[in-house]
């Protein structure tokens, strides 16, 4: 896989498109909250539970031949105030025709590590929780690697150790389909966590791998949470009580996750709106619903997107349609993905998206303490807990 293909596939893997939602009425915090200043924001730990390094305006030109980021990508990333993000790696789809899933995943891991090494003045690979703290001290962005589909493990539990030793600290059990572990969002919601899936959960607990249940079907999700002895995450999803799509999670799943000490992350995706035209108002509604269900200590964000601004919205719309059609054609699309979707919030896209979200929440009278938790402190505490 060459650099251009790697980057394009990474961008596709990071975006999971959707539709449908009514924002509903959710009560905000009763405390009066002042607007968040840049100075205050810059002191926070800001975390994205699922991101990708690419320039949405020109994905193929985001990474140079020597693996360095383009000036535009680097500039917008540094402007964002981001401290840490999880990068999707491995082969997320059920299979790439003619490819070996294990081999493809190792290759993609190598490519991401080359990217981090080539930009070591601003990026740091996370192998232990201490690396997150060190990156913050060094004014670098911590990059933690994660799978979006644990089908890459095959039937060998030792592969959990293999991939962890290669830097994969978070493993999502399923993507949209069914695998050897359980059921995903696109198949029956009644598919259970398999016998092997129970062993995978136990193994990941033993090795301090963070289990991610984004994209999972409801029964698989509930049974995995119940089986786990450590907190888990649903890093990028929405609230099904507001939009009834299988990529969004039920209150039952969210509540059980929080009861286990886990973290629920909201994506910046079209699944948040019933007509697929999601904006920051829909995002705020989902965050508020999640806080009401899970409590403010168990809510976070996972954009499932990038950090560059939009230069030409019409071009981006056309490019997004091409990507969506590709996902539909190869069976990777979730229910609700359709042409015409945008895989980001058009009113808060780009390097200012987290700061703008902070002040959207402040306008709704959420306290700065709560906003800081949602933007990263909760994730910081979870990673510290699970990764020891």
Image (spheres, rainbow, N blue to C red):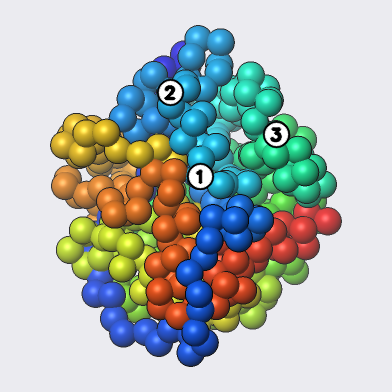
- Label 1, secondary structure: give it: loop
Residue drawn 21% across the image and 67% down it:
274
Residue drawn 47% across the image and 22% down it:
71
Q: CA distance from mark 1 to mark 2?
A: 17 Å
Q: Is residue 204 visible?
A: no
Q: Is residue 157 left or right of residue 99?
A: right
Q: Is residue 116 left or right of residue 65?
A: right
Q: Is residue 166 above or below residue 35?
A: above
Q: Nearer the viewer, residue 48 or 199?
A: 48
**Residue 221 picture location, percent across and down:** 53, 67
**Residue 374 picture location, percent across and down:** 56, 67
Looking at the rendered image, the disc whose residue lies closer to the viewer, 1 or 2, is: 1
N-term-proximal mark, 1 vs 3: 1
Disc 3 target residue: 124
Q: Is residue 107 left or right of residue 142?
A: left
Looking at the rendered image, the disc whose residue lies closer to the viewer, 1 or 3, is: 1
**Residue 253 picture location, percent across and down:** 50, 75
Q: Is residue 188 left or right of residue 10?
A: left
Q: Is residue 315 above or below residue 253?
A: above
Q: CA distance from mark 3 to mark 2?
A: 19 Å
Q: How many C-alpha atoms fall within 10 Å of the one at disc 2: few (<14), some, or many (≥20)?
A: many
Residue 80: numbered disc: 1
Q: How many C-alpha atoms fall within 10 Å of the one at disc 3: few (<14), some, or many (≥20)?
A: many
Asked if the residues shown at circle 3 and circle 2 are in contact, with their CB atoms under 8 angstroms apart, the answer is no
- Label 2, secondary structure: give it: loop
N-term-proximal mark, 3 vs 2: 2
Residue drawn 55% across the image and 37% down it:
78
Q: How many C-alpha atoms fall within 10 Å of the one at disc 1: few (<14), some, or many (≥20)?
A: some
Disc 2 target residue: 62
Q: Residue furthest bottom?
A: 30
């Amino acid at each position: 896989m060459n650099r251009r293909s790697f980057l394009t596939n990474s961008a596709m893997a990071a975006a999971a498109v959707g539709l449908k939602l009514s924002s509903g009425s959710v009560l905000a915090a009763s405390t009066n909250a002042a607007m968040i200043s840049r100075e205050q924001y810059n002191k926070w730990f800001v975390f994205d539970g699922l991101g990708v390094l690419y320039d949405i305006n020109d994905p193929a030109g985001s990474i140079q031949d020597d693996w360095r980021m383009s000036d535009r990508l680097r500039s917008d990333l540094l402007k964002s105030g981001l401290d840490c993000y999880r990068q999707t790696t491995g082969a997320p789809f059920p299979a790439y025709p003619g490819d070996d899933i294990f081999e493809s995943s190792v290759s993609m891991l190598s490519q991401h590590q080359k990217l981090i090494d080539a930009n070591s003045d601003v990026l740091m690979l996370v192998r232990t929780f201490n690396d997150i703290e060190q990156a913050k001290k060094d004014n670098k962005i911590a990059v933690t690697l994660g799978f979006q589909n644990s089908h890459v493990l095959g039937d060998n539990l030792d592969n959990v150790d293999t991939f962890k030793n290669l830097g994969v600290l978070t493993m999502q059990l399923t993507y949209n389909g069914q695998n050897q572990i359980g059921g995903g969002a696109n198949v029956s919601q009644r598919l259970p966590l398999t016998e092997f899936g129970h062993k995978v959960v136990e193994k990941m607990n033993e090795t301090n791998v963070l289990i991610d249940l984004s994209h999972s079907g409801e029964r698989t999700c509930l049974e995995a949470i119940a089986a786990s002895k450590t907190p888990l995450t649903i890093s990028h999803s929405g609230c099904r009580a507001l939009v009834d799509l299988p990529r969004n999670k039920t209150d039952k799943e969210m509540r059980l996750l929080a009861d286990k000490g886990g973290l629920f992350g909201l994506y910046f995706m079209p699944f948040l709106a019933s007509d697929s035209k999601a904006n920051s108002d829909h995002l705020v509604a989902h965050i508020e619903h999640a806080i009401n269900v899970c409590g403010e200590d168990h809510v976070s964000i996972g954009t499932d997107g990038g950090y560059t601004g939009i230069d030409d919205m019409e071009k981006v719309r056309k490019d997004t349609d091409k990507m969506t059609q590709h996902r539909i054609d190869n069976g990777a699309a979730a229910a609700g993905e359709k042409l015409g979707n945008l895989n980001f919030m058009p009113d808060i896209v780009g390097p200012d998206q987290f700061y703008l979200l902070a002040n959207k929440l402040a306008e709704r009278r959420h306290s700065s303490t709560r906003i800081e938790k949602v933007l990263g402190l909760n994730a910081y505490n979870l990673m510290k807990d699970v990764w020891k």
